Image (cartoon, rainbow, N blue to C red):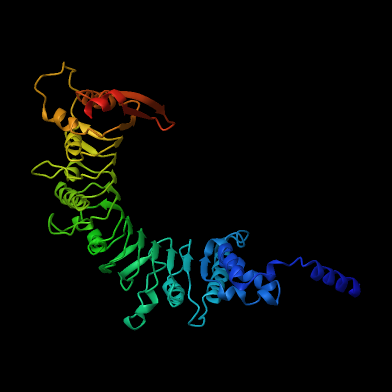
């Protein structure tokens, strides 16, 4: 029996079946970095060749979800304790203090369950050890800000974040965010912010997303005030009566963001005092005015006071804008805000109106007048507009009829309905294209 085992082992060696172990370390580490840290650690039992290889993997992926299937058969309080104990042992082993030269390309921490009140004592240790390896990318996900908090290294260890270029935080508590001179991409979602939150100034920041911050006085301008190279901006805020959640700097004082080409600003309103809403939407309009060269713009939940300046009733001048999407926005009496938007976006090519609201009744259709109003003149200036997409409920055809009447007033630009689709949610989407005849005449 023993001889047959040796014979089979010799045959395997002669056939060179274990070719994976013959690969150089750099390729093996690249493979292990793609399978997840838990599976990478399990490869240590394969042979001596793999025993300590996982320690050199440049990615540390601490993911609680990988342990949920193991403990799925254990229900109740004891099952949750065993689940967390196994996960904690794994995280401590994976993030044990390594030699200083072993840097990380990526550090990921994903926690799904709310854990006991001593959570910070445990998760702080993991965050410190992960950042101690000077990662180039960090992604931390927690169920709420009471589980994980961001720890800014002391000034004596500020070089630990000198390589950090991508930072994604979800449900993490933030007291301050400093010491990231190379940060190019920042995503903050549902993060808890301290009342004295301090943000960094990154001269190389290119992509920024601030989504539904919790608590604190997050001012979006604090994160983008010193971002001259910012190219992509995403902001999702709740209008809860605190105008400081927007951009508090008066228009003309806050610096422009000339490099932003794509922006998405989405607002969810709560029932607050009218004065608070006016201040909030005024701050949002000031933020729009700081994007003079934006090419793609997505606005959601905007009131008319957020689109138009209160006194002059003007929309910010956006000469480079080519695609505009308005979702659930209030566009004024008989779409008067829409005409002012078109007047100040002369190069607009595509406009999408999704479930927008207007005030007033549909005017009776009249014959074209020799004296054209300001609305017709504003629409006539949009010589580059090629596509209009309207999405509304099937039981609200007046929106479609009113917009059709508005665009039929354009004297040299006939429109043609090319697509009409109804979805299961009761929404009807219609696309109007500018005809070639109209384009030829306006040229």
101 and 198: which one is in front? 101
Q: Which quadrant of the figure contains the C terminus?
A: top left
Where is residue 80 drawn, in percent x and y?
55, 64
Rendered position, 88 above or below 35: below
Asked if residue 27 lies left or right of residue 292, the reply is right
What residue appears at the point 59 percent right and 67 percent down from the top-left corner?
Answer: 32
Q: Position of residue 55 (x, y in %)?
A: 57, 76
Q: Is residue 220 left or right of residue 250?
A: right
Residue at position x 52%, y 71% in the image: 58
Residue at 26 percent across and 33 percent down: it is: 385
Q: Which residue is more in the foreground, 345 or 145? A: 345
Where residue 14 sits in the image (x, y, percent)?
Answer: 81, 69
Residue 439 or 94: which is nearer the viewer? 439
Going by the picture, which residue comes out furthest to the top?
367
Q: Quadrant of residue 42?
A: bottom right
Which residue appears at 33% of the width and 25% of the height?
Answer: 395
The N terminus, quarter of image: bottom right
95 above or below 114? below
- Count the labels in the image: 0
Q: Quadrant of residue 81?
A: bottom right
Which residue is nearer to you in this view: 337 or 443?
A: 443
- In-image side of 242 versus 89 (left or right): left
Find residue 248 and report its horizontal and vertical position in percent. Answer: 17, 58
């Amino acid at each position: 029996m023993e001889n047959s085992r040796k014979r089979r082992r010799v045959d395997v060696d002669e056939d060179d079946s274990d070719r994976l172990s013959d690969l150089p370390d750099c390729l093996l580490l690249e493979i292990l970095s793609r399978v997840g840290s838990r599976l990478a650690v399990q490869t240590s039992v394969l042979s001596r060749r793999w025993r300590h290889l996982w320690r050199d993997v440049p990615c540390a992926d601490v993911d609680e979800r990988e342990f949920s299937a193991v403990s799925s058969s254990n229900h109740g309080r004891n099952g949750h304790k065993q689940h967390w104990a196994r996960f904690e042992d794994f995280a401590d082993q994976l993030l044990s203090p390594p030699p200083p030269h072993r840097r990380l390309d990526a550090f990921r921490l994903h926690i799904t369950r709310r854990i006991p009140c001593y959570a910070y004592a445990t998760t702080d240790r993991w965050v410190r050890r992960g950042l101690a390896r000077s990662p180039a990318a960090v992604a931390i996900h927690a169920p709420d800000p009471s589980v994980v908090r961001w720890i800014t290294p002391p000034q004596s260890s500020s070089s630990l974040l000198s390589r950090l270029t991508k930072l994604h935080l979800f449900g993490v508590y933030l007291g301050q965010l400093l010491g990231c001179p190379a940060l190019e991409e920042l995503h903050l979602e549902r993060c808890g912010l301290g009342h004295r939150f301090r943000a960094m100034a990154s001269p190389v920041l290119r992509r920024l997303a601030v989504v539904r911050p919790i608590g604190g006085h997050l001012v979006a301008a604090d994160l983008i005030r010193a971002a001259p190279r910012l190219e992509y901006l995403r902001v999702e805020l709740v209008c809860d009566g605190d105008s400081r959640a927007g951009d508090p700097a008066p228009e003309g004082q806050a610096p422009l963001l000339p490099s932003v080409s794509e922006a998405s600003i989405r607002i969810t309103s709560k029932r607050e005092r009218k004065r608070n809403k006016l201040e909030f939407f005024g701050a949002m309009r000031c933020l729009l005015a700081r994007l003079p060269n934006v090419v793609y713009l997505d606005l959601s939940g905007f009131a008319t006071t957020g689109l138009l300046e209160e006194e002059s009733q003007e929309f910010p001048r956006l000469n480079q804008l080519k695609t505009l999407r308005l979702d659930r926005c209030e566009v004024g009496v008989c779409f008067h805000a829409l005409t002012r938007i078109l007047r100040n976006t002369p190069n607009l090519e595509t406009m999408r109106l999704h479930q927008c609201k207007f005030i007033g009744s549909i005017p009776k259709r009249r014959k074209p007048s020799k004296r054209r109003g300001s609305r017709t003149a504003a629409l006539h200036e949009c010589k580059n507009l090629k596509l209009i997409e309207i999405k509304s409920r099937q039981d609200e055809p007046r929106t479609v009829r009113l917009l059709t009447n508005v665009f039929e007033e354009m004297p040299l630009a006939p429109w043609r309905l090319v697509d009409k689709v109804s979805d299961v949610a009761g929404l009807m989407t219609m696309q109007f294209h500018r005809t070639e005849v109209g384009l030829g005449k306006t040229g």
